[in-house]
Amino acid sequence: MKNIVFETDGFIATTYIKGEVRPSGKGKAITARKGEAVRLDTADEVPLFFFAKDKVVGGFAINKEMALNLEAKKLVKTEMVSYSLLPNDLYIYIGPCLTFSHTNVSRDTLLRVINLGYGAAAKRTDGIDFLDVPLLVLLQMRELGIPMKNIYVSEFDTFENPNILYSELSGDKEKNVTEAKLV
């Protein structure tokens, strides 16, 4: 399999799979230059990229605790204000990460998520409570007014794809590298 590539008008994100040559060094967190890459190193965290065509691209690695503290929303909102971005002009890409069936949480945490108004991200199966972290992040982006048509979610789960992706839950020490840029 080749690297995981997501591309839309003016934006491309590449997640380098196991065994493929990957970029090294520290990547940028945000850039306004076309062709300059923003890089995130994640294993099971949510690689959250935001971009506005021809203006800016940035990214944050959002872990479960950050998502529960609504930090994804706060971080993207800060950049929206900083770059004078309107919700309709902003696009979101959520890269490969853990999906809900691998994110167990306590009942108290699940009830907290529900009480915050994010019941769609709270799951319960066979008496076990789960948190859908990518969905929790998506819902936070929707609260910022970003249209659903501007939000893209990878279909790859880091734990369920051990041949191509690293997962801390699987015991991997390495991280997945995802680069994104304006094109």
Image (cartoon, rainbow, N blue to C red):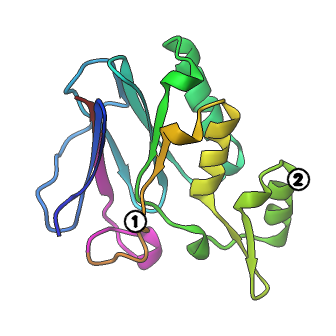
Residue 4 shown left or right of residue 155 in the figure = left
For the residues labelled 2 and 1, the Cα–Cα distance comes to 29 Å
The amino acid on which the numbered mark 2 sits, given as a three-letter code, is: Asn
Q: Quick check: is 44 in the magenta stretch?
A: no
The amino acid on which the numbered mark 1 sits, given as a three-letter code, is: Phe
Across and down, in percent, residue 144 comes to 66, 30
Residue 156: numbered disc: 1
**Residue 64 appears in the figure:** no
Q: Residue furthest front?
A: 149
Across and down, in percent, residue 25 comes to 20, 41
Residue carrying label 2: 115
Task: Name the residue located 36 percent from the left edge and 17 percent from the top edge.
Answer: 55
Residues rendered magenta in the picture: 164-179
Task: Name the residue located 61 percent from the left edge and 47 percent from the top edge.
Answer: 137
Q: Is residue 162 above or below residue 7?
A: below
Task: Name the residue located 66 percent from the left edge and 73 percent from the top edge.
Answer: 104
Residue 31: numbered disc: none
Q: Secondary structure at mark 2?
A: helix
Task: Name the residue located 22 percent from the left edge and 28 percent from the top edge.
Answer: 183
